[in-house]
Amino acid sequence: MAKTNLDPVTFEVLKNAYGNLVDQMSEQVLRTCYSFVIYCRDFSSALCDANGDTIMQGSQDIAVHVGTLHLTAKAILRAFGDDIHEGDIFIFNDPYEGGTHFCDVRIVKPVFFEGEIVAFTLSNGHWADVGGKVPGSFDITAKDHYGEGTRITPLRIWDRGRYLDDVANCLVANMRGSEDRLGDLRAQAEACNVGEREFLRLIAKYGKDTVLLAARECQNYVERIARSRIAEIPDGQWETVDFIDQDPDLGEGLIPIKVKMTIKGDQVHYDLTGSHPIVGCFLNSAYPATLSALVAGSKAFFPDIPLNAGFFRVFDVTVPEGCVANAPWPTAVTGFCSGVYEKAQAAVIELWSELMPERALGCAFNLEYLLIGGWDRRPGFGNFFMWYDWMAGGHGGRSTKDGSNCTAAVFGLGLSIQPCEGQERLTPVITDEHSILTDSAGPGKFRGGCGLTKGGTVMSCEGSVMSYCCDRARSIAFGIWGGLPSIPQGLWKNKGRDDEAFLGAIFSGVPVNAGDTFTRPSAGGGGLGDPLERDPLMVLEDVIDGYVSIERAKKDYGVVVVENDPILLDYEIDMAATEKERAHIRQNRVAWMKEDPGKVLQMLVDGEIDEMDVVRRYGVILDWGIKQVLPKSTAQFRQMLEKRTVSHWS
Amino acid sequence: MGKYRVAVDTGGTFTDVFIFEEEFGEVIVQKVPSTPHNPSEAIVAGMEKAGISMQDVQLFSHGTTVGTNALITRNLPLTGMINTKGFRDVIEIRRSTKPDLWDHYKDVAPPHVPRRHRLEVTERIDYGGNVVKPLDETEARQVAEIFKKRGMKAVAVCFMNSYMNGEHEQRVKQIVQEVMPEAYVCTSNELLPDIFEHERFSTCVINAVLGPVVSDYLKDLVSKLKGLGYKGDILVLHSGGGVMKAETVTSYASRIASSGIAAGAIAMNQTAQLCGYPNAMGLDMGGTSADISLTYGGELRMANEWQVEFGYPIMYPSIEVITIGAGGGSIAWVDPGGSLRNGPQSAGAEPGPACYQAGGMEPTNTDANLVLGRLNTNLLEGGMQISKEAAEAAVDKIAKHYGMSLVDAAYSILKVANANMCDALRLISVQRGYDPRDFALVGFGGAGPLHAAYLARELEIPTVIIPRYPGVHAALGCLLVDVRHDLQKTYLATSASAQIEEIEDIFEQLEAEARALLKQEGMTGERVELKRVMDIRYIGQWRQLAVNVPRPITTLDKALEVFHAEHERQFSWSNPDQVVEIYGLRVTAIGKVPMPSFNKADNGDQAVMPEPRQVRPVFFEKAGGFVDTPVYRRRDLPPGAKLRGPAIVEQLDTTTVIPVGVKARIDDYLNIIMDISR
């Protein structure tokens, strides 16, 4: 029955069958999971070969897990070696050994055929809580992992088919919502069983040799396509830098993450040498997550190539240990997704945008998580609640069209936001506004996508605190090819009241009481190309839809729009005034970017300009709460603007 | 009194007419080109071609793609939306996801109502239905005035938490109707009192944009048919697998946006039940795509939502249909990694497969079937000639690339196409916990009967059914359905806290509403059938299972028992000791339409086998190559006829392949039944 030569039909059939297998695993997880984070699609499924290398990943998997699944399977192999048996299932979440952060819990099952391991099935899901100091396990103040949550090194949870409930109970006893965690564990283990069953069905049908050969050929196939594409690109070296806002231990100053890309023949090398050392908060990342960022960023330029080990073979990566992107044990790394991950990915996307302009992208808004946890004191309630929220935002401008409005973070385009009506039912937090933020998009010939604003009021509760995991309050989403940045991120508490406070882009454990309000934007995307070259008619349409205000149409695009009758949507462009305004901006804008920051601040205080002018016109970074110039950050930001924006202006 | 029942299925390319004569059980079928600019023209043309006067028609039922096409082409009336202050962008934000995770240049379609036409009014209701901020009626009137000035044809009113309290929406609807009496106005609460703002708003907006389109179309159709002397009702098929009267459709326009797709699945189910197969899958394969559906125990598998474009769900129960890009015109190609692929690109009707010689140069499934001798060069009973040489030249591209023979290449193309369809069949069966070995496969559409036996063999499906008129089979689906309404209401409680009286009250309210709807359609008394469903899940889980419950409901025990058992079947896990959560209550109301009964032949066992019309060489892998194969004409085959593969059966617009060693018989309803079990 078993044939060893692989005809094109059998190969195509098995390749699709592997895709079908992992998608079946994903469906199983979706249908039975307990964590809403998983239900909103922060999870992934994989089929790995006996060495742990991926044969296939789910078609809807979240980007951030991409480069780490094979490392997880390899970590299990390394830890258990010969001591792996039929019916075993393992659990793991160790970021230093092949995970991302503790919340991403992986279940791994070896698939045996006639006594030997032929594959692994793997299910990774973001559990809503894995213990630690704060609800949701996002403790911004953590310096090492001990306070962050439960670290699960390679661990057996089913032994030859016997469920080790003592082990499982010990794990979940350290987490909030223990029962739900067991539900997630079961859902993921069952997904692995589904994958195993399907793989064995294929072996029964096609024979072991054919199935394993086709699996290897799947990896070679992906490698072959990827290499043929890379080979078409001339050899060369390119470098860029993106920044995390700050290291709280060092005071103000952006934290550089440098990426140098070398293409030689059909191989790509990324070198992060020169990046900043680890920072004193949890935005660091361990090596696996950085690898994931680099591969996922590259993947955006090869959307049609399936993801498996064959794709990884094309990339070599150098990340010096001890730098912010290769944090050693026991450095805190839970916030990697808002920190290093987004920056390394943005840098890679910028580099590839130069090489493949037809897929170019400006920078997107930064992934953010806002958590409010405490005791629900609404009538009829009395439980511990967690309001755990993340937003959609704007993506970067593209070479042929604007960036996409209000879309999931680049971190994972499949990660869906939650309905406010669901949140309001489950928690004492009522949303006051969830809408597109006018002028939030970075201006450009093709502007970024629009970001949003979402805020609310805390209702009857007790002992409640708020934590925020974000970034880019200072290292604002950038434009490329002459495009401008969007807007700073960061959260305001009680805005417009006497006790208003700008809490910034990362904080944790801030007490909140009934009646407190909060609001924060998700930024728009950075613009692409010189905004003065934008078709005035496109600006006009944006004004009619309220994506851009009349005021900023003039300031950012030099387009003067006259409002005749808003009720009938009657607006028109004053062409003469537009020409004059554009000439005025063109003449002065380089000088504006060099204006003394102190003077810029004074103009802001005097009400001559607003905060958008501070960023887009003058390239100045302030502490947005106390209105103070941040000189070092401003110098770095201006240097960045010079390269990405100013030097492209004609 | 008319003696004909007429079903018309308007598709993108063809309008199919299926006419049933009640006295003698005679069937007439017709196929005419669709007229997308005004679909009712094709209907009239089809009736004329069939030679039947509308005066003799007793009942006219209809499946239409008018709604689907309007949504796809975005040829929609000017529509405005009124939202709670702070929430006008809900339908633009959606759930923020994209279907293609890696392609940053592929965008989700823009919302059906642009931002400029989404206006806000001050009001707010909380999760419990309590008014947090009263409605500002002055603002509402201002908004209505603005819409009036802008010449809006339709308005959707969508407020936060209106699923708990629809008063504000209703009041605004009244105000809008006062200000602009001609406009079509709907509210999210009256259409779908269900939690989750985007899904409810999306349904309401789609309903609003389709309202004027659908009512204009039906008005025109009604007047045309009346003009021809038709006196009965026009029944329109909706996504839930039932019909509504033309007059009711106007209020629930979004329900008929998939009217056309549902028809094939219903026809499949009817045929399978008629042949005695409670479990069946349907393969409706046409020129560009294949629609796959499933029935279990006689009940079509339903989904709770569906969408025409990604990101804009319509939250009504609908027959689950998986559509994949595999049709007769699907193109075979070699990707950059050297893998042989099939579809989803299609040569469509224009230019069509290479063998049509109308400009198509790429090899398609039709070309491969022709190369292998499975298709005749003479189609539509002489109405169309296709070129074997042109097909060979196209397939040769694949052969050259792999250094294989022409025949091997053609066979490989079909194997890949079949594998893709098998994956889709697996998706709807294995992935949902059904074993294909317990099913029959009904193959229809222009291309289904060419492939069905091979798919069945691959999935170990023991029986294949090819209906009498595969090319127009879907139209039969419009003929054979009852009036149906689906109503639902969010209800959240645990199995411990649920108040059985309260549940009974809500069910009764929903049923009263359903009865009122049916009464408007002339359905009362014994013709009315009501079914209750409860959505249940384990506490903490995010998806629910639908469980049938009795009327009246006095205890939860039976429902819970069914829930645990079904959870076990679908997900290999259950825990009867765990507290579960009730999530929603639903009522399905059926108004029985008298069904026609098809004639059963009575000369069962003494069938005389006709002579084949032709013997031609056809390729079969099991035979080791080309073998002389008898070719029968479908209408020559009497009930009771027995065939043994290899054999080919040809009819007007379809060719059926009976592979080597497969036994087939013609049943009493003239279906071909193939026995694939080994």
Image: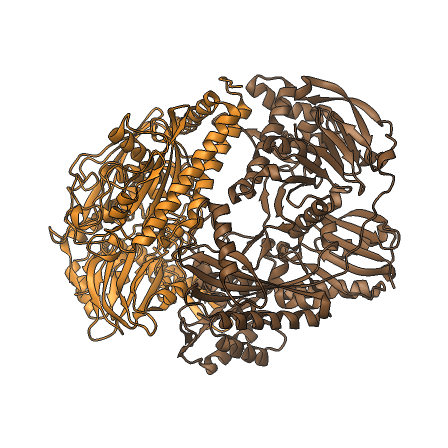
Q: Position of residue A302 (x, y in %)?
A: 41, 36
Is B566 or B21 nearer to us in this picture? Answer: B566
Chain letter corresponding to the colour orange:
A
Q: Quadrant of residue A90?
A: top left
Give me the residue at 23% from left, 59% from top. Answer: A467
- Identify the coloring: by chain
Q: Position of residue A158 (x, y in %)?
A: 33, 38
Residue A482 visible at all: no
Is A526 or A585 nearer to us in this picture? Answer: A526
Is B542 or B225 nearer to us in this picture? Answer: B542
The N terminus of chain B appears in which quarter of the rendering? Answer: bottom right
Q: Quadrant of residue B462?
A: top right
Colour of chain B in the rendered structure image: brown
Q: How many marks?
A: 0
Q: Position of residue A75 (x, y in %)?
A: 27, 33
Give me the residue at 53% from left, 21% from top. Answer: A7
In the rendered image of this protein, does residue B639 appear above or below residue A14?
A: below
Q: Residue furthest left?
A: A250
Q: Quadrant of residue B443?
A: top right
In the rendered image of this protein, does residue B132 appear above or below residue A448?
A: below
In the rendered image of this protein, does residue A455 appear above or below residue B416?
A: below
Q: Is residue B435 left or right of residue A517?
A: right
The C terminus of chain B appears in which quarter of the rendering? Answer: top right
Q: Position of residue B163 (x, y in %)?
A: 48, 69
Residue B256 visible at all: yes
